[in-house]
Image (tube, grey):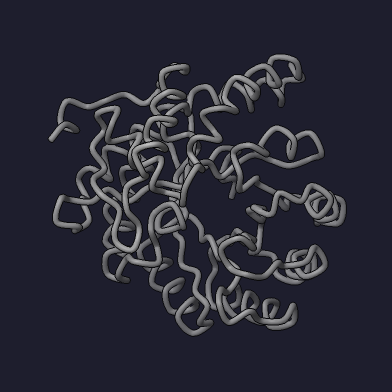
Amino acid sequence: MEFGRILTAMVTPMQADGSVDVEQAKRLAAAIIDCGSDGVVLAGTTGESPTLEFEEERELFGQLLPVCHEHGGVLIAGTGSNSTKTAVESSQRAQEIGVDGLLQVVPYYNKPSQEGMYQHFRAVAEAVDLPIILYNIPSRTGINMSAETQLRLAHDLPNIVGTKEATGDLELAVQIIAGAPDGFRVWSGDDANTLPLMSVGGYGVVSVLAHIVGAQIRAMVDAFVAGQVDEAARLHRQLLPVTKAMFLTSNPTPVKWALNHLGFAVGPTRLPLVEPPVEIQAQIMAELQQVQIDLPLPATSAR
């Protein structure tokens, strides 16, 4: 299954009391896809997966799946864990719901060996029929999955169809791209690296920035694919300051603050995440004023 070049790692809207706001999540998913994304990733890092309960995740998957499909997008479920048993069970339940694919993060905190990572992902892939995107983000997990391990998984397990590379290491990405089987995709896990990664054969991006400027990211990616490299580079440079602003402190606090400030209410983050400090809010605000905001603001979003 083709997931598309632009997937948005979606925030999880919350009520003021910290409960999940499913209705606002539906509106946000629809708006993101309408602005140019090919689909959304739910319950990933940006969706505050460490503090979501399993039942909350499954409700989001079930409630948002028809919304995504109605708007022509896919739903990728973040069902990774540092417990292989949990990752398998969560993936099987997501498959029962009918999601289009899975995002599987490198096991965090327990720091497995490369062989341990291989066996972990193999167990998940063999337990489901869904296509799987690997997620390599050493800044969060504390360990890097090597190109060799990713290629071994890509060749051995046909439903492992791609990787979200958030290392910032273009050499590692090139090794994966060069050795991968036909159809294996490499998405950038960092908005700032989307165009550099595509220039060496990467496929697209799993984006945070697309919450706000999705149409412009679509234009940049489409321009590059069409061979309009100068135009793609211009858009990349234009978006870089606001991209940096979205990562001035721990994701997703800047993008949630920005969405709330713009009038698309997504509520607070859950502890231990808190709002950005005042000085970072000012920097985010300054960069937002320099770009065209693509996200349509529904009348029901203001609270």
State the image coordinates of residue 24 (x, y, percent, origin top left): 22, 42
State the image coordinates of residue 185 (x, y, percent, origin top left): 70, 49
Q: Is residue 10 above or below residue 220?
A: below
| Rendered residue at 23%/51% (across/down) | 14
Q: Is residue 293 left or right of 185 when viewed as pictured? A: left
Q: Is residue 107 above or below residue 247?
A: below
| Residue sitting farthest toward the front | 279
| Rendered residue at 43%/66% (across/down) | 95
**Residue 108's quadrant in the figure?**
bottom right
Q: Is residue 47 above or below residue 115?
A: above
| Rendered residue at 34%/32% (across/down) | 31
State the image coordinates of residue 122 (x, y, percent, origin top left): 65, 77
Q: Is residue 282 left or right of 173 when viewed as pictured? A: left
State the image coordinates of residue 34 (x, y, percent, origin top left): 39, 28
Q: Is residue 248 left or right of 240 when viewed as pictured? A: left
Q: Is residue 240 above or below residue 66?
A: above
> In the rendered picture of this protein, how many numbered marks are placed on residues?
0
| Rendered residue at 33%/36% (across/down) | 30
The quadrant in which the C terminus is found is: top left
Closer to the camera in the image, 211 or 38: 211
